[in-house]
Amino acid sequence: MSGIATAMPPARWGSVWWRSTQGGVMLTALLLLLLLATALIAASIGAAGIPLARLPAALGLWPSHADPSTLARDQLVLWSVRLPRVAITIIIGALLAASGAIMQGLFRNPLADPALVGVSSGGALAAAATIVVGDRLLAAGQTALPFELLPAAAFLGSLATTFILHRIATRENRTSIAVFLLGGLAIAALANAGIGLLVFAADDRQLRDITFWLLGSLGGATWEKVAIVAPFLLGLLIVTPFIARGLDLLVLGEAEAFHMGVEVERLKRLSIVLVSAMTGAAVAFAGVIGFVGIVVPHLLRLIIGPGHRRLLPSSACAGAILLLAADTCARTIAAPAEVPIGVLTAIVGAPFFLVILLRQRSLVGL
Amino acid sequence: MRPVAIARRFLHTGILACLAVTMSLTAHGDTVLKDATGRNVTVNDASRIVSVGGAVTEILYALGKENNIVGVDTTSLYPRAATGKPSVGYMRQLSAEGVLGLKPSLILAIEGSGTKETLGVLQSAGVPLVVVPDSYTGDGIVEKIRIIARATGAVERGECLAARVRADLDMLGKLETGITKSKRVMFVLSFVSGKAMVSGTKTAADGIIRMAGAENVITSYEGYKQISDEAVIAARPDVVLTMERGGPGPATVTSDAVFAHPAFAATPAAPNRAFLSMEGLYMLGFGPRSAQAARDLAVSLYPELKPKAADTAAAAATCAE
C-alpha cells in the first residue's frame, strides 16, 4: 500500500471541481449549512416533545402565546437537556472524525482508527475498572463519589495507553509507525481481556453499566461537560495548520518528508498527543463510538482529495453531522429508552466501509 | 434399594452411586411436581440440595433446610450464612461440572437460570432439577414457597410460611385501601456519569412498586435500560426510588447527584426531593420478606398510611417444625 494519495482516486461521483479553491469554499459552506439543518432537526425532536410551533418561542426568538408553565417547561427541556446534548454531540463527532483522519495520515494506512490502535480500549478498560472496582475500593470513609471519576479515569486510561504505545514504538528517538500500529493491536487485545475479566467479576448492575458504556451514549450532557470538551476542538483547530502540510508529505514516506523539510518526529509526537487527547475526551464522555473515525474521512477524501489542510476541518464538520443524525435517532426511535449510539454508527458504518473496500479493491491490490 | 443395584450404578458413574446411597438414607417418598418449564419432575430425596437464586435460598432457610444445602449461586446473599456455602457461580452461567461435583440429590433453580445447555446436561445426569417459577407478584411468592416446600418434603412448614406471607399480603392490601392518589415512581438502577439506567416492566423493581400500591412510570419497555434525559422529564415521576448497595461507588445513586441533574431537577419529585433508597436484596428479592418490604415501601411512599400500618403490624409467627 503506497499511501492514501494513490489509494484514493477521484471517485466517479466526486468531481475534481470540489478540489479547487472555489469548490472548497462551496463544500465548507454546504457542510456548515447541513450541520445547521441537522442541529435544528435534532433540537426539535425528542422524547419530551416540543411541537415545531412552540420551538421559536422556547428558543427566545419571539414572544410566546402559550401559557407560561408550558413555556417554562419547553425552555427547560430545550436549554438544560436538549441543547447541551446537541452541542456535545457536535463536538464529539468532530473530534472522532478528525482523530480518524489524522491517524490515517500518520499511519499512511486507510484503516487506522483510534479504536483500532487501542486508544479507545485503554479508556474503556479504565472505565470498566472504575465501574467494578470503584464500588469496592471506595466503600470505606467517603460519603459520595465525585461524578467526574469515570470520565477522568477513561481519559487517563486513553492517555496512558498512548503513552505506553509510544514508548514501545520509540527507539533512539525514532517512532516506528508499524510498531505503533501492531503494538496497538496487541494492547487492544490486552485491554479487551482485562474488560472480559471485569465483566466476569461484575454483578448484574455493573454488567449493565459496562455494556451500555462500551456501546456508547451521549446521554447526561450538561453545559459543564460541553465546556470541558470544547477546548479539545479548539486545540484541533489551532494545531491543524501546523500538521496539515507535514501529514500531506508524510504520504511519500518518512525519509522523503524529512528531506522536504518536515520535522517528522515532532510531527508524529504532536499528532499522537492530539489524537489521544481528542479520543480520550470523546471516550470519557460518550464511551466507545466506532466507525465515525473511519467512514467520515474516507468519504471526504473521495470528494476533496487527500490534502489535510481541508480534510481535517471538513472531516470534523461531517463527523459532527453524522453523529448528530445518529444520536437523534438513538434517543428517539426507542423512546423513552435509548439505543446505544455505537450500535447505530456501526450499522451505518460497517456496510459503508465494505462498499469502500469493494470499490477500491483493484486499486489497493487486495 | 438393593446392594447389587448400587454396585451396578457405581460401575456407571460415581456420582450416581453416591446419590443412591444418600437416597436410601433419607428418601421421603416420590413426589411428582410440575416445575416452571412444565415438566413433571420426580423428587424423592432432598438431603443434598444445590440452590440457585437468592429467593430459593432464602425460602430454603425459612423452611429450616439450611443443613441440606450443599451449594448456592452467587446471588444467594441472604441470610448472610448462605454466603459461606460452596458457590456454583452466577445463576445464568452455571457450570454443569461444578454443580454435579457437589453430588446433589436435588437442584432447585430459579426461573431464568442457565445456561440452557447446562440445565440440559444436569437433567440428563439424572439429578432431579426443579425450575422454580419466578413472577414478581405476591401470588408468585406463595407459589415459589409451595413448590420448594413440596420438593423438599417440608409441606407443612411450607404451608405455614405461605400462610404467613399471605397474611402479610392481605394486610398490605388492607393498608393500600387508604391510598387516595397513587404515586408515580421511577426506579433508577444506576446513575453513571449523568446517564440513568431505569427499570421498565417485568423486573423485580416494577413488581415491588406495584405491590406497594404505586405506579411505575416506565411501561413502554421491559427490563432495565438507559433512558434519555428528556424521557425522564416526560415520565413525570413523583418519587425516585433506588437500591442501596455496599458502598458509595461511582454508580451509587444519591439524592444529591440525581437532583443536580437538569432532567431530574425538572420532575415533580425535585421540589421536595422525593428520593427513596432501600436495601437491594430486601426490596428486590421476591422471597418470604417481600410482602414486608412492599409494606415498608408503601409507608415510605405514603406517609399518611403510617398510623394504620402500626395497627396492622404483622404478628409474624415463626413456622418452626
Image: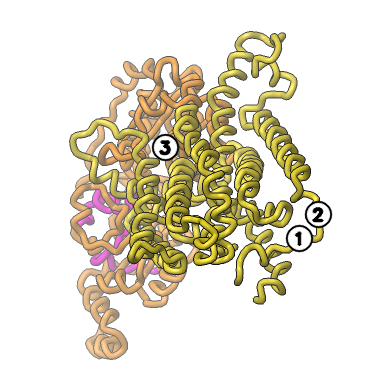
Task: State the image coordinates of residue A11 (x, y, percent, origin top left).
Answer: 77, 60
Q: In the depicted view, which residue is nearer to us: A169 or B86?
A: A169
Instruction: Name the subunit of mark 1.
Output: A
Which secondary structure lies at badge 2?
loop
Say what amino acid the circle numbered 3 marks: Ser
Between disc 2 and disc 3, the foreground one is: 2
Say what amino acid the circle numbered 2 marks: Ser
Instruction: Name the subunit of mark 3.
Output: B
Give the labeled residue for mark 2.
A15
Q: Which residues are magenta?
A: B42-66
Residues tagged 2 and 3 counted as in contact (Cβ below 8 A): no
Residues tagged 1 and 2 counted as in contact (Cβ below 8 A): yes
Task: State the image coordinates of residue A299 (x, y, percent, origin top left).
Answer: 69, 54
Q: In the depicted view, which residue is nearer to us: A165 or A237?
A: A237
Near mark 2 (Cα within 10 A), the count class, few <14, some 14-19 or many ≥20, is: few
Give the labeled residue for mark 3.
B193
Give the labeled residue for mark 1.
A10
Q: Is residue A358 visible?
A: yes
Chain with yellow colouring: A
Q: Earlier in the sequence, mark 1 or mark 2?
A: 1
Q: CA distance from mark 2 to mark 3?
A: 45 Å
Instruction: Name the subunit of mark 2.
Output: A
Horizontal relation, residue A36 to residue B112: left or right: right
